[in-house]
Image: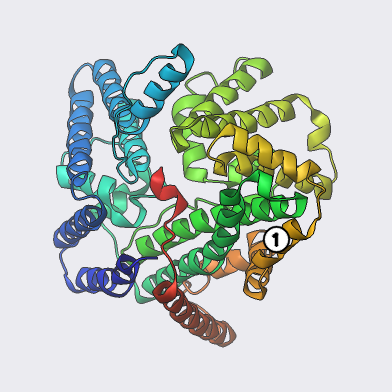
Amino acid sequence: MTFSSLVFLCIFLPIVFVLHSAVPSLKVKNGLLILASLLFYAFGEPVYVLLMIASAVMNYLFARLIDKTQPKLFLTLAVLCNIGILFVFKYTGFFVQSINAVLHTGIPVPQITLPIGISFFTFQALSYVIDVYRGKTAVQKNFFKVLLYISFFPQLIAGPIVKYKDIEKEINERHVTADGAAAGLRRFIIGLSKKVLIANTMAVCADAVFDAGFASVNIAGAWLGAIAYTLQIYFDFSGYSDMAIGMGKMFGFHFLENFNFPYASVTIKEFWRRWHISLSSWFKDYVYIPLGGNRKGAVRAGVNKLIVFFLCGLWHGASWTFVIWGLYHGAFSFLEEFAGGIRKMPRILGHIYTMLVVTVGFVIFRADTMSEAVGMIGRMFSGFDFSPAYTAQTMQLVTPYFLFMLVMGILFCAPAETIVKKLRTAGEAEDLTGKEKGTQAVLYCVSVVLLAWCIIRLSGGSYNPFIYFRF
């Protein structure tokens, strides 16, 4: 991580929290959070903060127009404008490259810097205007409340995708208790620890394997890299979601869970109910159900799912690897609709099947090109070359610290599900027994130790941004 991470952790967040706690007026609190959010985004994207503000203005006006006159017309314009902005900044280069590859043309590929988190705040804005059109959310006449909703810094650049109706009451009225703020801080530290201690350690191994290329690894190295990346992306993204949920609590907001131990799933369908829940529910509410959902038969439902998974893959990035990854998951989801045997498998076999599909899928997700993905997957199932060169390269990655974090990663991504769920919510109840209070005191002491450990790792570590910052 860079110096900016420590600035955020040790200066920015504490100052904003203290000021937010000190001012009595909710109006001033909201203004402070808007200012802090704009400064936070401008620190990394000084120009594109204007784009985010423009998005907020545009969607605020569209929602007002939808509420007053010709709702279908202005909803259509809102969708076209939002998707158009997303296309220009995220997909123009990909579109031109694809045309050049198919038609053998030489159209110059525009070099457009991708604004951080544009997919997240665009989808949030779209959910707001669509819900206003559907009558599920009352139009907000105060622009600054819409701006706070879109720009709120804890979940601005990597989710979870929050619907306006879920936090509308807290924008208008909220209370922060000492217990709630403390529980939020602990949740933030849990997320930070997942990122800094586990995800970053897995990233060293995954990057080494994928950067070396499939020709440089055998079956052991390929599986080591694939498993490391599977753990990295989970602890990286769920860690950010934990941090966002924790920071939200510190300021009086309660975001919905974004991960529910997806690696405990026994089918791909269940995996997607547990993985990136805010994105899955977004596509379900605003794409799958409008397409007809499962109301027109199993085949049509399967086709609708394939469309959703195609869009889900494309949402993740302007590359055919992401599109293929989405369709790959869609194909297995489609298969499960018609292959009842998969759903009836013993739980242990279902879990093995699901994790095998997910792990292979993440190789496609991680690879820069499909040829690299196919090569790496081929090595995972046929790379039986155990010459000293291959073995030595793999053993260099398997350090004691890596093995320790690998065990911790496997433990806390599924088997310790019940324990972690209790840790998420413990400490917020007001009627704790003496024993429970003692347990909470120990847990807070552990949190302090974890925070200190994270700061030490950040101070001496290399830059390793959250994976989903680029989406």
The image shows residue 105, relative to residue 2, as above or below, that is: above
The image shows residue 78, relative to residue 464, as above or below, that is: above
**Relative horizontal placement of residue 36, taking residue 464 as reference (left or right):** left
Residue at the outermost top position: 103
| Quadrant assignment for the N terminus | bottom left
- Name the element at disc 1: helix
**Relative horizontal placement of residue 74, taking residue 365 as reference (left or right):** left
- Residue 135, how many percent across, how many down? 33, 29
**Relative horizontal placement of residue 53, taking residue 238 as reference (left or right):** left
Q: Kindly identify the residue that appears in the image at 14 percent across and 61 percent down.
A: 28
- Residue 286, how many percent across, how many down? 44, 28
Q: Pick whichever, 258 or 210, lies toward us.
A: 210
| Dot 1 alpha-carbon crowd within 10 angstroms: few under 14, some 14 to 19, many 20 or more | many
Residue 248: quadrant of the picture: bottom left
Residue 126 visible (yes or no): yes
The residue wearing badge 1 is: 394
Q: Pick whichever, 444 or 104, lies toward us.
A: 104
Colouring scheme applied when the structure was drawn: rainbow
Q: Kindly identify the residue that appears in the image at 49 percent across and 74 percent down.
A: 427
| Quadrant assignment for the C terminus | top left
Kind of residue at badge 1: Thr
Residue 181: quadrant of the picture: bottom left
Q: Pick whichever, 109 or 329, lies toward us.
A: 109
